[in-house]
Image: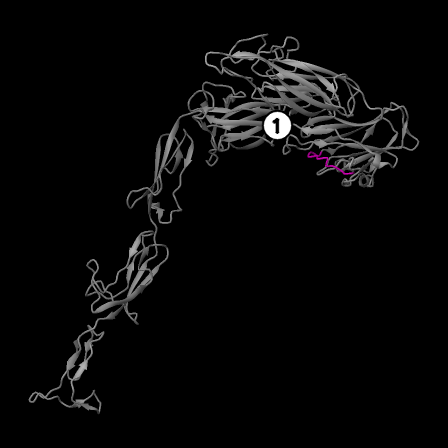
Amino acid sequence: MHLQNIGMSINGTSATSTVSVGGTIKITPRIWYNSILWDPRAAVNPKMVVVVDSDLAFDSVQPQMTANLFTVNPTPTVIPNYKGNVGKTAYEFELTGLTFPGSTVPGYGNYTQNRIDHLNFSFKPTAGMDGGPHEIKVILSWDNNTTAASSAAPGVIYSSDTADYLDPYDANNNGNTTDRLSTITYNYTFVPPQAMVLGKKVKLSTDSVYQTSIKADKGDILDYQVRVWNNTNDPVENLHVIDVFPYANDKFIVKDGSGNYLDRDSKIYPKAISGVTANNSKFDIYYSTDAPSATIEGNIGATWLPAASITDWSAVTMFKADLKSGQSITAGEEVLFNYKVEMPDTKDNLAADTANNSVASWRGNNVDGANEFTDSKVGTHKYNIATHAFYDLNNNGVYDSTDLNIANRPYILVKLDATGNETVVESGTTDSNGNISFTNKLSNEGNYKLYVENLTSDSFASPNVASSATVIGNDFTSFTTKASVIKSGQTPIPNTPWSTVDISLTRDNPSAIKNLGLKTDFYNLTVKHIKDEDGSNLVADVVTREPRDTAYTTAAITTDPNFEVDTANLPANANGSYTADTTVTYHYIRRNAGDVTVHHYETGKTDELYAVSATATPAAEVLSGARQMGKPYQTYRRDVSTAGSYPIPHYHLVGTPTGPASGTFDATAKTVTYFYERNDAPDVTIKYVDIDTGANLTRPESLGSSVMINTPTVLSGTNKRGTCMEQQCTSCRQL
């Protein structure tokens, strides 16, 4: 495949190559494909790289697909100072899924001939662009290319470009600039407006070229330059310039065409470290530490101080420059204002966050006629290291679905200074999926080293396969000895082996993927929880499989409502290491429950009636709750024999018992009360007769009574079974 140039247009016409501020440049490269394949062949890491001057702002990309062999990500990766070329910005567009189709008919290859897909890129020049000729380069890049002019090698896609095919930028990052890609160059000329031109650019203090937008790291010193250029034929007097530094929830300095102050949307807030210098003395320069206003009038009305009154430059929020009375900017004259700021820590910022550094100017008191340069931006590099740690169980050297993620494994990331001294950046453990990510944790480029603690039996995966865009392999290169984190509870803390890998992050390549593949022996740990009363399981066995020398801890179940661990029979191997298949057994006994107390009372009384035998003293029954938690209980009436029990003589049950007569032992003590009445006995008739005549004798009705009767006395037996009867002149006998 290769690129073909379908043309360039300026403001919709291809008849000119000249553009000014407000114009639009549209370029249309297309990809041409040709292949005969049995099987589909994917391009590895395919992308379109558009390299432009930093003063040319990206506007949009519009796909125009015919072959439909890929989808394009409309949000490019922006790389300032591309590959060390200061002033050149690259926009990288991913071509997702770019694949040459394979055969669709058995026995025949798929012939892809003269198939094409277009991409239309639009850019707009900013006022900061220098007048004169400029160029745009478009590079089609992919990793599985070759240095050969043609190739039928498996897996290779070669460049069919016969003109501009070398890779001078190393766009595919393989360290080779002689492999063949495909490039198109578009040329245009920028003509600055015939007006007072206001602009603002920035550079790192270590660079030599000012740019409209750059990226910077924490601690970088940024050198801003505000440019006022009289590109007219007449002198300009009574000019004012104001520069409001980025702040949270900031607004543009000047109203838009509808009279509104739009959000400037800064998310990064550099702080000034110096005052403003100018290339001539025609302006008075002042500073303010007031909070910026949401209107230009409010900012003009702030408290303004000369440089001599500023003691803390980081407190300065804006500066203004007033052209002195009697001074003018002559035709063609250029005035430059320079000041320095320091980049804050940006590790918590998103990749798209910027410091939006606009500047405004106006003549006399005509603030309604003010204009604003809004294109100057400073972004940040988002440094990241991503690692996946795994055990290569099938010994193929790469991670796949059969392998085991290494979770909760300690790691330490350090940054190395120029002499190799280490400073800890972060330490932690791998997540449950074996991953480590340093997203939003790194602020600067540099040399780093990542340590991951190993078990003593760990070794690197074999075969040792390096990771790639599609393969998770092993990128760690050596072991070193450091104090253990896994065994930090031991005294003294032992040293253990740690896998190590060196990582270099640069502004051009701010991300790295370094995976860790290990191998070791594995053993099973089975944890049992057994009920001693019948040998059954309290819960199902828990079986885990871990690498050799992995420490394990187990614990008894404490949440079961009915059982508790037998503390007199705890397992000796409750904690240990995976050195062989191991079984840990916990034994459980029932918890103690509340007693159930059973009373047997005669109705209306509280004397106990029930005795366990004829000779025992009546007392309450107590069903002991000792080791009975969760078991059922049953109480019984005792006026009848139950399972051979001794019955209460002469009584019968009445009503229903109070309390739960049956149920389950729990933590609460319970009381059950049965009530009884005496059984009826036959009445007893007592006769007093003359033994000679058989006639009833006359006698007092009762002892001491003066009432005389001569009828027999009847003693009622109702509810009297088993009680004593008494009558004068008789002995006590039971009814």
Q: Amino acid at mark 1?
A: Tyr
Asked if residue 508 shows in the view, the reply is no
User: Residue 471: image x %, image y %?
Assistant: 51, 21
Is residue 155 left or right of 370 when viewed as pictured? left
**Vertical relation: 215 (above or below) 685:** above
Residue visible at 22% across and 66% down in the picture: 648
x%, y% of residue 574? 38, 38
- Tell me residue 609's x, y (percent): 25, 67
Magenta highlight on residue 615: no
Please indicate whether residue 618 sits to the left or right of residue 241 in the image.
left
Q: Residue at x 40, y 41 (%)?
A: 555
Residue situated in front as seen by the camera: 441 or 382 = 382
* Residue 263 shown in magenta: yes
Q: Can you identify the residue that label 1 sits on?
A: 383
Q: Are there few (<14), some (14-19), or many (20+) residues within 10 Å of tag 1? A: many
Position in image of residue 196 (x %, y %): 85, 27
In the image, the segment drawn in magenta is 259-269
| Quarter of the image where one finds residue 619 | bottom left
Picture quarter with the N terminus: top right
Q: Residue at x 16, y 79 (%)?
A: 684
Quadrant assignment for the C terminus = bottom left
Element assignment for label 1: loop
Above or below residue 530? Residue 16 is: above
